[in-house]
Image (cartoon, rainbow, N blue to C red):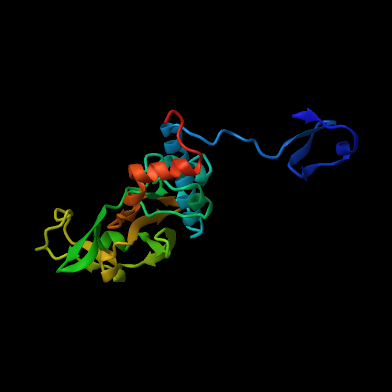
């Protein structure tokens, strides 16, 4: 940072590779970009990749306009903290700048003080389903939103993949549910008259689901359940090394 003189004293903003700004009665100039060493240690790469990918997940969630994270900090900060222990996919620099995002199991889609809804993927009478611990009487008094996360993948002629994550939010009523038969072995069999969402999409290996309860501005803490394992190919040692190479390699190796 240096104090500006001459003609720059009357300028404020970006000029070439410089940023000119005022502080009190003085004008200062500094480089617009701070250049840091590109090479990283494994720990630094892990932290950067998690942060970068969670940013991409946040953008996908924000696009739904259904952002429910309760707390005394901005929703972005609460989302990043809630997903701080998410799996780490290692993406190359070009993939990150393309806004690519991967469908991850256990991604937190809402966070608040209401009791969490229990659910998991399974079957009802041989049909794919999202089994829940909700009863019809309980669900009828709740405002429920179903988050549907879709992983799309395109494979290019050179064998490389590009992928996107799209999230849609659907309001639900009790008419959308069916009763889980009492004869069915279910993780919620001890809850009499529990409900399920049934349909072929609950068998789709590229979809994920989150069921959120909203009441008077408060929400439940809910995570994604999915059959998708596509993300796993980006958690390997090979993926780590490819990501590191795109940033100039790893230090000490």
The structure residue drawn at horizontal position 40% and vertical position 55%, both measured from the top left corner, is: 214
The structure residue drawn at horizontal position 45% and vertical position 34%, both measured from the top left corner, is: 250
Q: Please indicate, yes or no, whether residue 31 appears anywhere in the rendered image.
A: yes
Residue 206 vs residue 72, the one in the foreground = 206
Please identify the residue farthest to the left as the structure is shown.
183
* Residue 90 image offset from top left, x and y in percent: 41, 45
**Image side of residue 132 versus residue 93, left or right:** left
Q: How many marks?
A: 0
Residue 247 vs residue 30, the one in the foreground = 247
Tell me the quarter of the picture where residue 154 sits: bottom left
**Image side of residue 30 versus residue 182, left or right:** right
**Image side of residue 185 versus residue 216, left or right:** left
| Quadrant of the drawing holding the N terminus | top right
Relative height, residue 170 to residue 251 (above, below): below
Tell me the quarter of the picture where residue 242 sits: top left
* Residue 173 image offset from top left, x and y in percent: 34, 67
The structure residue drawn at horizontal position 90% and vertical position 38%, both measured from the top left corner, is: 7
Residue 94 vs residue 228, the one in the foreground = 94
| Quadrant of the drawing holding the C terminus | top left
* Residue 49 image offset from top left, x and y in percent: 45, 42
């Amino acid at each position: 940072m240096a104090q500006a003189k001459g003609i720059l004293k009357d300028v404020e903003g970006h000029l070439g590779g410089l940023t000119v700004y005022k502080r009190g009665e003085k004008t200062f100039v500094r480089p617009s970009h701070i250049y840091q060493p590109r090479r990283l240690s494994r720990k630094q790469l892990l932290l950067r990749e998690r942060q970068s990918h969670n940013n991409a997940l946040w953008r996908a969630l924000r696009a739904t306009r259904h952002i429910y994270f309760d707390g005394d900090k901005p929703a972005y900060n609460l989302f990043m903290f809630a997903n701080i222990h998410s799996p780490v996919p290692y993406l190359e620099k070009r993939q990150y700048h393309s806004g690519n995002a991967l469908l991850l199991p256990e991604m937190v889609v809402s966070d608040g003080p209401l009791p969490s809804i229990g659910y998991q993927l399974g079957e009802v009478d041989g049909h794919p389903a999202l089994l829940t611990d909700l009863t019809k009487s309980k669900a009828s008094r709740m405002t429920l939103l179903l988050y549907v996360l879709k992983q799309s993948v395109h494979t290019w002629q050179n064998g490389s993949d590009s992928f996107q994550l799209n999230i849609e939010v659907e309001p639900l009523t009790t008419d959308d549910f069916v009763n889980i038969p009492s004869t069915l072995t279910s993780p919620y069999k001890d809850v009499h008259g529990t409900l399920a969402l049934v349909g072929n999409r609950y068998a789709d290996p590229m979809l994920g689901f989150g069921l959120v309860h909203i009441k008077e501005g408060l929400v439940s803490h809910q995570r994604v359940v999915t059959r998708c394992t596509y993300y796993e190919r980006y958690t390997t040692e090979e993926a780590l090394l490819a990501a590191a190479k795109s940033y100039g390699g790893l230090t000490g190796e």
